[in-house]
């Protein structure tokens, strides 16, 4: 069996901590067994190892997040990148063709597709081992994982099982993706399950479907047509159109931590970062990534979230409305993480004739920035903390706190850290600086 974990998202539901560069699965907020904090994807990797699934895992993300995915998976798993975001079906197809084209998967092999940002107990992942046998025994084209709904929701797919069931699985009468609340309530009354976003099928089934809809099964040819492909979800493209479905029922813990309401339920402390709460503030949480303190006094049932990208104060039940607000007021993220560290845009000033961008960057120990050559801007680096070396056109310069380096346009440059480093970068350009801020 091969397990494809899809890493995606637009970073809107958990704004301002998440953004298009740092998806929610990278937020280190969840309690870890060692008493510290871990991210959703870090928690997932720990569980995969515990359930013996690590050797089968392949992570699929947008190409801009490949380095960040490798960082948070500690380079323990292969990662491939989508050239464009085209939905969960297209990402799953890309993963299948990657395995097929490289001879890593045979036609009869089972492929399991799952989101990388799910939150479930360890037993949930233990069900994955049963998929090959269940597909064979049930003769189903796709096997699903479902769990008992706790309330009507229009944010989930619903699996309506047939009455007859085996000890391992149930055949599926019908699948409905995100019905309205009235329909969701009716489905729950008929013993429907929430779809957990996990799908298992044979590689042969996926290749056959791609041929059926006129898409190439050669990996390179598939990449070539990627820009023209529509956004497709796996649920609507395949599951709703497939008659032969089976489902495993998971009786343990499974949650979608896609809102501030559900995520804060998992936090160990009501305040993360500088600040505090006092007075009547039951069910209120603060998460503050800024260096200035944030206080809430006498306001219950809210989240107060602060980052370089903005500040959100919202009633927990209504906080999801931020997604529509952010969508209509799109701005460039001011904070980003990379494989080697992070950056924060402190200031942008100037006009089309002269632009100055000031950033603060951090570099992890024993990491280095990518080797770059700026065509449109010069850079001035001031070392704030840590030790390492600056390489300018192949010449190595040891660094000390307080050192200043000037990087002229056209000079190939990078920084290597021996210990954790911090520095200020000032970019100065004539005309528009159209080079991307660090993303690798």
Image (tube, rainbow, N blue to C red):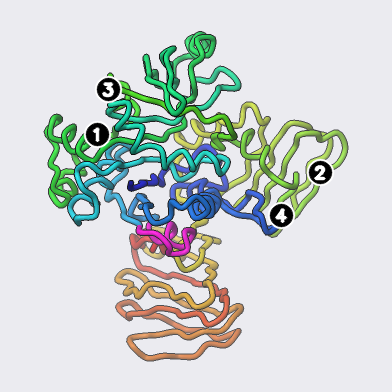
- Asked if the residue under mark 2 is in contact with the one under mark 3, i.e. CB atoms within 8 Å, the reply is no
Spatial distance from mark 3 to mark 1, Cα to Cα? 20 Å
The earlier-in-sequence mark between 3 and 2 is 3
Q: In terms of image quadrants, where is residue 107?
A: top left
Which quarter of the image is occupied by the C terminus? bottom left
Circle 4 sits on which residue?
273
Q: Where is residue 380 in the image (x, y as percent from the top left)?
A: 47, 77
Q: Does the magenta stretch include residue 182?
A: no
Q: Does the magenta stretch include residue 74?
A: yes
Query: Can I make out residue 290 in this image?
Result: no
Circle 2 sits on which residue?
277
Q: How many C-alpha atoms fall within 10 Å of the one at disc 2: few (<14), some, or many (≥20)?
A: some
**Tag in front: 3 or 1:** 3
The earlier-in-sequence mark between 1 and 2 is 1
Spatial distance from mark 4 to mark 3, Cα to Cα? 48 Å
- Give the SS element for disc 1: loop
The residue positioned farthest toward the right in the image shown: 279
Q: In this view, does 376 lie above or below 116?
A: below
Label for residue 230? 1
- In this orientation, which residue lies closer to the viewer: 50 or 212? 50
């Amino acid at each position: 069996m091969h397990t494809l974990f899809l890493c995606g998202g637009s970073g809107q539901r958990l704004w301002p901590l998440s953004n298009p560069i740092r998806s929610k699965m990278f937020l280190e907020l969840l309690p870890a067994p060692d008493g510290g904090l871990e991210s959703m994807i870090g928690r997932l990797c720990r569980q995969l190892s515990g359930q013996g699934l690590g050797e089968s895992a392949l992570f699929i993300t947008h190409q801009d997040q490949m380095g960040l995915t490798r960082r948070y998976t500690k380079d323990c798993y292969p990662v491939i990148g989508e050239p464009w975001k085209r939905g969960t079906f297209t990402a799953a197809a890309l993963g299948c063709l990657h395995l097929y084209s490289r001879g890593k998967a045979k036609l009869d092999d089972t492929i399991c597709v799952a989101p990388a940002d799910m939150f479930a107990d360890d037993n949930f992942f233990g069900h994955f081992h049963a998929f090959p046998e269940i597909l064979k025994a049930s003769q189903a084209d796709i096997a699903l994982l479902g769990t008992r709904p706790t309330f009507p929701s229009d944010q989930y797919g619903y699996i309506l099982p047939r009455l007859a069931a085996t000890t391992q699985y149930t055949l599926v009468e019908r699948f409905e993706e995100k019905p309205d609340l009235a329909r969701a309530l009716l489905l729950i009354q008929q013993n429907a399950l929430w779809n957990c976003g996990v799908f298992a099928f044979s590689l042969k089934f996926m290749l056959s479907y791609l041929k059926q809809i006129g898409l190439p099964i050669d990996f390179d040819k598939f990449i070539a047509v990627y820009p023209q492909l529509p956004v497709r979800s796996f649920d609507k493209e395949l599951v709703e159109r497939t008659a032969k479905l089976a489902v495993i029922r998971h009786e343990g813990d499974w949650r979608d931590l896609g809102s501030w309401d559900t995520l804060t339920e998992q936090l160990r402390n009501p305040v993360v970062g500088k600040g505090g709460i006092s007075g009547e503030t039951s069910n209120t949480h603060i998460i503050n990534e800024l260096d200035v303190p944030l206080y809430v006094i006498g306001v219950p049932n809210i989240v107060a979230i602060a980052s370089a990208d903005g500040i959100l104060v919202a009633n927990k039940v209504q906080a999801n409305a931020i997604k529509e607000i952010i969508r209509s007021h799109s701005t460039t993220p001011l904070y980003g993480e990379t494989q080697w560290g992070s950056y924060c845009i402190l200031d942008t000033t100037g006009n089309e004739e002269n632009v100055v961008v000031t950033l603060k960057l951090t570099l992890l120990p024993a990491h280095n920035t990518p080797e770059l050559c700026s065509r449109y801007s010069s850079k001035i680096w001031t070392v704030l903390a840590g030790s390492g070396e600056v390489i300018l056109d192949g010449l190595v310069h040891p660094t000390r706190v307080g050192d200043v380096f000037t990087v002229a346009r056209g000079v190939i440059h990078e920084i290597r850290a021996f210990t954790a480093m911090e520095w200020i970068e000032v970019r100065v350009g004539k005309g528009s600086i159209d080079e991307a801020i660090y993303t690798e």
